[in-house]
Image (spheres, rainbow, N blue to C red):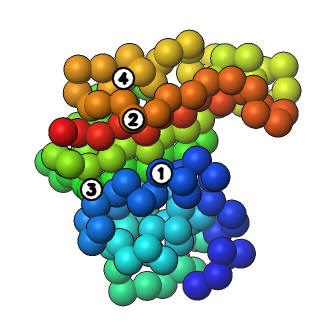
Amino acid sequence: MSEACGGAPSAAIARWAPLVPQGGEVLDLAAGSGRHTLLFLARGHAVTAVDRDVSALRQLAHDRLTVLDADLENAPWPLPGRTFAGVVVSNYLWRPLLPTIVAAVATGGVLLYETFAVGNERFGRPRNPDFLLRPGELLDAVRGELEVREYWCGEEGAAVRQRVCAVRV
């Protein structure tokens, strides 16, 4: 599979990818075109890719890929009780799911989360505060549950972003 199928992975997610325990299953949440799904498949992981529109993901047929069509905002959590060695979320925010996303990280597993933050409205979409992280919000989401390995918030090109890499020890 080529990177072109799903687009280039986020530089931060690619940099943190080696922290996901080798051979552990990865959850790519709101997976979109599958750019991070492809990254983790190439690293030898089984991947469960979840999105409400799985048309692009279905084109990534692979024996270690499970594609799950799910509306994360209007239906129950599609993976109750499941935990993963890696949980990846990029460019997606639905605040009611934050505790569930954190709980989906297995012991020894890693949460890799990045999305837009307050201030991004100056540059373009998303502009709606419902889809923009407040200062420190990702830190607050993992506090007491996961150990933060790296946190960053700021302007990046024509966007304001926030990201965290955190491990369940």
Name the element at disc 4.
helix
Quadrant of the snapshot with the C terminus: top left
For the point 33% across and 47% down, the residue is 110
Q: Circle 2 is placed at which residue position? A: 149
Q: Circle 1 is placed at which residue position? A: 16
Residue 89 picture location, percent across and down: 48, 45
Marks 4 and 1 sit apart, C-alpha to C-alpha, by 19 Å
Up the image or down, 78 lies above or below 126; here it is below
Q: Residues within 10 Å of mark 3 (few under 14, many from 20)?
A: many
Q: Are marks 1 and 2 in contact (CB under 8 Å)?
A: yes
Residue 126 picture location, percent across and down: 72, 30
Camera-near label (4 vs 1) is 1
Marks 1 and 2 sit apart, C-alpha to C-alpha, by 10 Å
Residue 48 picture location, percent across and down: 36, 65
Q: Residues within 10 Å of mark 2 (few under 14, many from 20)?
A: few
Q: Residues within 10 Å of mark 4 (few under 14, many from 20)?
A: some
Quadrant of the snapshot with the N terminus: bottom right
Q: Circle 3 is placed at which residue position? A: 85
Residue 84 picture location, percent across and down: 25, 55
Q: Are marks 3 and 1 in contact (CB under 8 Å)?
A: no
For the point 56% across and 13% down, the residue is 135
Name the element at disc 1.
helix
Camera-near label (3 vs 1) is 1
Amino acid type, mark 2? Arg
For the point 23% across and 27% down, the residue is 145
Which of the numbered marks, if any, corresponds to residue 141? 4
